[in-house]
C-alpha cells in the first residue's frame, strides 16, 4: 500500500524553469526600477526628440561626393 502523502504530491517544477521565472521577474523588476529612477531624464529626452525636426538621411547632400 502506498501512503497518502505519495498520492497528494504534485509534480515539482524543473529547476531550470524556476531559475528562468526568477530571472525573468528580476529583469522585469530591475527594468521598472530603472525606468522609475530615471523617469525625469527619460521625459526630458522624449521631449527633446519631439522638438528636433526629423532629418531624412536621403536628403543630406553632404553625404554625396
Image (cartoon, grey):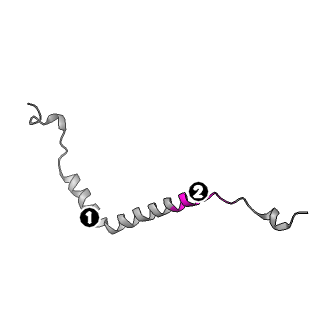
The magenta stretch spans residue 41: no
Q: Predominant secondary structure in magenta?
A: helix
Q: Residues within 10 Å of mark 1 (few under 14, many from 20)?
A: few
From this view, report whether residue 4 is shown above or below residue 57. below
Identify the residue at horizontal 54%, vertical 57% (top origin). 20
Where does label 2 land, which residue?
17
Q: Which label was assigned to residue 41?
A: 1
Bounds of the magenta span?
12-22
Q: Nearer the viewer, residue 31 or 56?
A: 31
Give how far across and how far down residue 26 sits, in percent.
47, 64
Is residue 46 shown left or right of residue 65? right
Which residue is at a point 31% across and 66% down the rendered structure image?
A: 38
Report whether 2 appears left or right of 27.
right
The secondary structure type at the circle numbered 1 is helix
Disc 2 packing (10 Å; few <14; some 14–19; many ≥20): few
Residue 39 spot, x, y in % from top left? 31, 65
- Residue 5's place in the image compared with 58, above or below, is below
Amino acid at each position: 500500500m502506498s501512503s497518502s502523502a505519495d498520492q497528494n504530491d504534485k509534480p515539482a517544477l524543473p529547476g531550470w524553469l524556476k531559475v528562468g521565472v526568477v530571472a525573468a521577474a528580476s529583469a522585469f523588476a530591475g527594468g521598472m526600477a530603472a525606468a522609475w529612477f530615471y523617469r525625469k531624464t527619460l521625459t526630458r529626452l522624449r521631449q527633446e526628440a519631439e522638438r528636433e525636426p526629423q532629418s531624412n538621411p536621403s536628403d543630406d547632400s553632404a553625404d554625396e561626393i
